[in-house]
Amino acid sequence: MGFWNREGVSPSGTLFSWDELSRISRKGALLSALKEKGQLYSPEDLELMLNRYAKKLENVPKDYGDSLLYYARIQIVDGYHRMMTDELSEIRGAVPLASSWKKFTADAKAAASKGTPGDRLRSLKYLIAAYTVYIREEPVHPVGMPFPGGFSVELYDGGYYCPVRAVWNDIDDAFCKFCPAIQSRERDLLLSKSERDIVTKKEKLNNYFYNFKG
């Protein structure tokens, strides 16, 4: 892997300015910048992020904690690898970034400017999240990520649904306000997939007959 940092960068201090990234307006330029900044990190940084996440799960029931850690690895490690190896076509690269990008970078700057050794890894967390949300247009929490109550992030009928999307205000550093997922509908939480498929099919048929039957 040619993109790993093996130079022993100090674990403290700011590695780059989020103000610089805030001025980017196109997907292609953003992906190039994310790759450049991503080269400042190492495999050990990713593992440290996972270890710190695992530490937070010590008082969580083991089965649920193991599941969360599994999806955290997808979010962090797989997300980093996708960011560093992805390529965009010229057309995709010219697509403007969502209007929330400046707010995202402002939040990233604040998170990474606490003056603690954790600033580096918080910046890395925001880099990976920026790739996921603004390049891939996917939820930060991977599809399948479980939440209390037995519900999870879903990709259904071409859209992303999250059971906690509407309650992000309860978490100061949540990425939910930038997430392309929408709040899971009540029926998503009550019906099985096969039952939802039937309801969705009926809705599409009704929409066709009421709006397009000519």
Image (cartoon, rainbow, N blue to C red):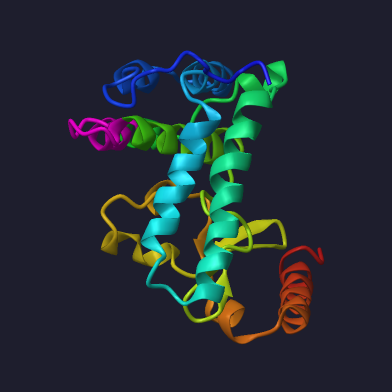
Question: Quick one: 16 or 211, which is closer to the camera?
Answer: 16
For this view, does 113 lie left or right of residue 195? Answer: left
Question: Is 86 above or below relative to 137?
Answer: above
Rendered residue at 40%/32% (across/down): 101
Question: Is 163 above or below relative to 19?
Answer: below
Question: Is 130 above or below relative to 5?
Answer: below
> At which x and y percent is residue 207?
72, 70
Rendered residue at 65%/85% (across/down): 191
Residue 79 falls in image quadrant? top right
For this view, does 155 lie left or right of residue 137? Answer: right
Question: Quick one: 97 or 146, which is closer to the camera?
Answer: 146
> At which x and y percent is residue 174?
35, 52
Q: Which residues are magenta?
A: 105-119
Question: Is residue 162 in sight in this rendering?
Answer: no
Question: Quick one: 186 or 18, which is closer to the camera?
Answer: 18
Q: Is residue 201 magenta?
A: no
